[in-house]
Image: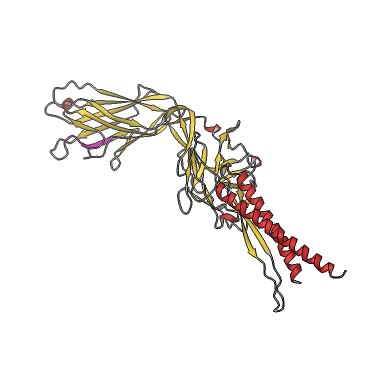
Amino acid sequence: MSISSSLNAGVMGLSVNGTRLATISDNIANSGTYGYKRSAVDFSSMVLHQKSSAYAAGGVRIDTYKDIAATGSLVRTGSATDIAVSGRGLIPVTDNSGIGSLSSERQMMLTSTGSFYPDQNGYLRTQSGLFLLGWPADANGSIGNVSRNSGLNLEPVNIATSQFTASPTTSIELGINLPADATNAGGPGDPYLLPVEYFDNLGRAQTLTLEFTPVVPGSGSSNEWNVRFFDSAGNPATSLGDLNLVFDDTALNGGRISTATAAGGVTYDAPTGRLSMNLEHGPVEIFIGRPNDSAGMTQLAGSYSPTAVTKDGAPLGDLQSVEIDANGYLQAVYDTGLRRTLYQIPVGDVPNMNGLNSLDSQAYSVSASSGSLYLWDAGTGPVGTVAGYSLMESTTDIAAELTDLIETQRAYSSNAKIVQTVDEMLQETTNLKR
């Protein structure tokens, strides 16, 4: 009967507008919640099979969802570990139970932003209990091959294990000029000493001393030097090896290395211009220059000038802070100036962002509706970059929600009027029997 279908339609209208009111209430309540994605509703009509003699109201139904694909504005903060995704994508997190769990048993969740801080054990977490996940880097800052379709290789980010660090010296660059007049006949033949500070595996400062001795001929100029190497960490009186250098004095390549001949524990690779030797702490390469190349060591008519002597490595350093760059690399910054990559934070993406399951604390999990997860490097593919010192604002628009609130109130009142009208009509029908 049409009148009863009208009653059903009115009741359904009250129900769906009550649901819409609940989503609006949630949105307004979380208008100041960082990372909150607004709840939305989608009304759709229901049509019953119609007969030509009468019309039956089908009513309305509602579908609710989180608009997770929407992105809020980023606001700057004073904390380097306030992290947000600038654009599409979510960062991986886990809960407290995932800290000690195997990666295959850990519950992996996703969130768009988080104000992380180190807890008493050094794990980066939010106040709501979400722990940041990342791929650990090796000593060279490399991530290697990792699984991108699951959280198999992800680990809770812990900075306590990197409180102190030392980086041993593995490469030294020499940019020095040896005086050409020292190899002339009648010269004193005094050696020139070049002490180079380096750092061993324990962060201690050691000294590698290079002794340059000119070869003084009976007449003319030899343009030849003998070099010996002494390591303070071993026996400082014993040379690690020998190197013979002959410089060119032609118009084309004057002052450049002509030949370099190494002996003992020192080897020379002409294509790279590097010496290789073993110090007490391990192997070190020293760049002296390639034959007939202006880079590296020269012999010109000037004074002895070690103008560009550089090395890698760093002494023992204390962790000062951690920072994250746009590519998702979490770096430790030490008081010695050394930066070391600890983790890479990937950015997750699914085909249907709005199909993710909503959890507490602005977190989400993969579902059958969302499609499979893929973990991208930040700033590649469809995903955005990772922003430190930033948090994402709620996607709630208060003005729009208040407008929807008024519309919902009017719609609810109108549906209530339908129920009231049907009730009065049924009362009239009942009165006909009296």
Q: Is residue 191 visible?
A: yes
| Quarter location, residue 44 | bottom right
Instruction: Give residue 32's position: percent from left, percent from top.
Output: 57, 41
Answer left or right for 184 relative to 343: left
- The answer to whether 81 appears left or right of 43 in the picture is left
The N terminus lies in which quarter of the figure? bottom right
User: What is the number of callouts on the image?
Assistant: 0
Magenta-span inclusion, residue 243? no
Viewer-closest of 219 and 121: 121
Q: Quadrant of the C terminus?
A: bottom right
**Magenta part mainly helix, strand or loop?**
strand
| Residue nearest the observer in this picture, 251 or 37 | 37
The reply to whether residue 234 is visible in this rendering is no
Is residue 291 placed above or below 57 in the rendered structure? above
| Residue occupying the point 46% across, 26% down | 316
Report the front residue among 174 and 56: 56
The span shown in magenta is 254-261
Instruction: Please state if 207 lies on the left or on the right of 224 as rendered.
Output: right
Residue 274 x %, y %: 31, 37
